[in-house]
Image (cartoon, rainbow, N blue to C red):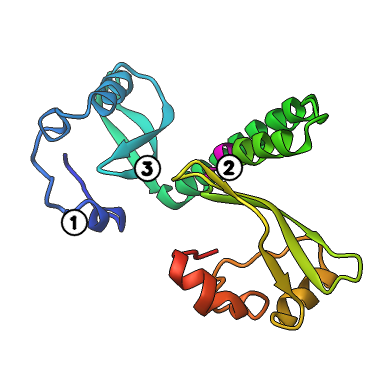
Amino acid sequence: FTLSEGKGLDDLGLKPGQSVGRSVFELYKNYPAIVQNIRRALAGECFRDVIELNGLYFDVRYSPIRDEHSEVTGIIGVATDVTEQKRTEKILFEKNERLIRFQAKLLELIKIDDSNFEAALKRILREVSKTLDVERVSLWLFSDDRSLIHCESLYVSPRDSFQKGINLYAKDYPKYFAALEESLAIVAQDAAHDPKTEEFRSNYLEPLGIVS
């Protein structure tokens, strides 16, 4: 190293100039991908690559330095911290993979023999729980006068068990029922404090450890 500067050094626990005078091959001997990239650059190749280092990701541009005879005498490596970008890409990839699995599962569930409604419903709830990786999945139906919702079936994956017969009344949970009338989906990341679902806090969410 003849020069070592930049904000990314802080993330690696290094100070500007700390690596100057050290062999790059010694410093990165435990990172074969980095060593390989350095050898490629020393062989005269100009390229870029994303590397992982101690849980951080860097987009590195490698450029060989040549003398007046076009001989490679060193390399310049410019690294940009792209850790947040890579983490976001990972999250999006995982979400997309989950969506693909869910869509494939939906196509499979469509073919279920529904001549036995209860058996078919149990299979659907179990498969949805597994595909979405959630502990509780249930089907609730409104009464004719929409004064209550009735639990046709509730699947709890840790116990691999089913429950049914629970009723929730609009008079007891007016905010929740109002939200149901306004939207087909209720998204509550913090269910205990979301205005649409906070009515369930003391008797349902907190006792069962449900967050969202």
Q: Quadrant of residue 68?
A: top left
Q: CA distance from mark 3 to mark 1?
A: 17 Å
What amino acid type is highlighted by mark number 1? Answer: Pro
Task: State the residue at coordinates (28%, 18%).
Answer: 71
Task: State the residue at coordinates (66%, 52%).
Answer: 138
Is residue 211 rendered to the left or right of residue 7? right
Where is residue 32 shown, x and y percent of the image? 23, 23
Q: CA distance from mark 1 to mark 2?
A: 50 Å
Where is residue 184 shown, x and y percent of the image? 81, 61
Q: Which residue is mark 2?
A: 129
Q: Nearer the viewer's eye, disc 2 or disc 3? A: 2
Say few, some or many: other residues with alpha carbon within 10 Å of mark 3 (under 14 / 14 to 19 / 20 or more).
Answer: some
Q: Quadrant of the N terminus?
A: top left
Say few, some or many: other residues with alpha carbon within 10 Å of mark 1 (under 14 / 14 to 19 / 20 or more).
Answer: some
Which sits earlier in the primary sequence, circle 2 or circle 3? 3
Q: Quadrant of the C terminus?
A: bottom right
Q: Which residue is mark 3?
A: 58
Say few, some or many: other residues with alpha carbon within 10 Å of mark 2 (under 14 / 14 to 19 / 20 or more).
Answer: some
What amino acid type is highlighted by mark number 2? Answer: Ser
Task: State the residue at coordinates (83%, 74%).
Answer: 147
Do the numbered discs 2 and 3 sit on residues whose CB atoms are within 8 Å? no
Q: Which residue is mark 1?
A: 16
Relative to 59, residue 212 above or below: below
Do the numbered discs 1 and 2 sit on residues whose CB atoms are within 8 Å? no
Where is residue 7 shown, x and y percent of the image? 30, 58
Assess whether residue 151 is covered by the magenta stretch: no
Relative to 201, residue 88 above or below: above
Where is residue 114 shown, x and y percent of the image? 81, 31
Segment tinted magenta in the rendering: 129-133
What amino acid type is highlighted by mark number 3? Answer: Phe
